[in-house]
Image: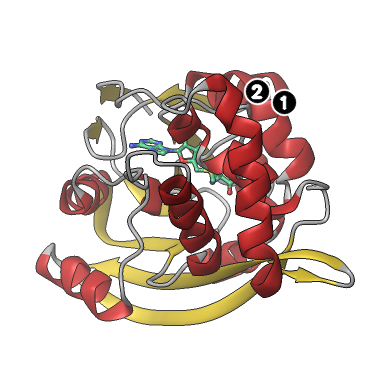
Amino acid sequence: MALRYDTPSLMRWNARAYDSSFGYVSAQGTPLIELLDPQPGERILDLGCGTGVLTGEIAARGTTVLGLDGSAAMIEVAVAQHPGLEFMIGDGGNFHLHRPCDAVFSNAALHWMVRDPDAVIRCVRAALNPGGRFVAELGGAGNCAALTSAMLTAWREYGLREPELPWYFPSPAEYATRLEQAGFTVRLLEYFDRPTPLDECPDGAADWVRMFAGSLLDDVPPGTVEPLLRRVNELAAPALRRESGWVADYVRLRFAAVRA
Ligand SMILES: C[S@@+](CC[C@H](N)C(=O)[O-])C[C@H]1O[C@@H](n2cnc3c(N)ncnc32)[C@H](O)[C@@H]1O
């Protein structure tokens, strides 16, 4: 699948740490592959494929799959781990496939494409054959609310400028409206809590912030970073630390839509 793309704005990912400590993100994507129900011979785009774990699972169903991601670090690991598969660096809000595909799949990535969610949906529609499927899961309204509220409070307590959170967590109604307005028929839409153990994150909420909001730490004076993150942990602990360990308050939006 040839692709025209522009690289998205700077995103910094520690792809190795993503797989070793946050492997739950792709592990939790397996039910989404069942919803996609990939058929042998289909052409499928994995949008925001990260290190390609789910891209590989979709390919194993006999499909031709292309992984697209905005992060060169993620794509580098994806290529190394799945040498037989095709991966490209590209922007979910500004890409074009020269040959359309049968389905677009996306796990835990659409909420990162904050600049223009409608542009992302338009690109997906243009990438699909008529009747093609758009099957995805993203953070929904209220996702990680205890985590982000601890962050905002800690930033405020340290006299730091309120950080601009890098995510878009829509309500089901809002996202369904965007899909319909772009020419999709929504066949299924689920909105559910998914408490997620942070088993590989000994430093709990602080580890989560380092991975998923690391760019916000760039604006924090170096000597303040560790005390700030300790404070995030203190503030988040009552809601998120259990006897068994830390559990993040994920809320998911999962949908299957068809290009009308
Ligand atoms: C949490 S990871 C999910 C990766 C993978 N889908 C998985 O399930 O493990 C989010 C991914 O979205 C990618 N991403 C964020 N914004 C993007 C954009 N505008 N265009 C393409 N990819 C983007 C990131 O680089 C990252 O790899």
Q: Residues within 10 Å of mark 1 (few under 14, many from 20)?
A: some
Mark 1 lies on residue: 81
> Which residue occupies the foreground of this view, 216 or 182?
216
Relative to 187, residue 17 above or below: above
Which quarter of the figure is the N terminus placed in?
top left
Mark 2 lies on residue: 77
> Do labels 1 and 2 touch, CB within 8 Å?
yes
Q: Is residue 48 visible to the viewer in this orientation of the structure?
A: yes
In this view, the mark in front (1 or 2): 2
Q: Position of residue 202 (x, y in %)?
A: 83, 47
**Which corner quadrant of the image does residue 90 belong to?**
top left
Q: Position of residue 141 (x, y in %)?
A: 37, 71
Question: Marks 1 and 2, how far apart in space?
Answer: 6 Å
Specify the label residue 139 is tagged with. none
Would residue 201 appear left or right of 90 to someone viewing this image? right
Q: Position of residue 243 (x, y in %)?
A: 88, 72
Residue furthest to the left? 181
Q: Residue sitting at 67 percent across and 37 percent down?
A: 18
Which quarter of the figure is the C terminus placed in?
bottom left
Amino acid carrying label 2: it is: Val
Q: Is residue 37 visible to the viewer in this orientation of the structure?
A: no
Would residue 240 appear left or right of 68 to someone viewing this image? right
Secondary element under disc 2, as helix, strand or loop, is: helix
Q: Residue sitting at 22 percent across and 42 percent down?
A: 115
Q: Residue sitting at 28 percent across and 46 percent down?
A: 114
Would residue 185 appear left or right of 82 to someone viewing this image? left
Amino acid carrying label 1: it is: Gln
Specify whether tag 1 is near ligand 1 (CB below 8 Å): no
Q: Residue sitting at 37 percent across and 44 percent down?
A: 166
Residue furthest to the right? 244
Q: Position of residue 60 (x, y in %)?
A: 69, 46
Relative to 229, residue 15 above or below: above
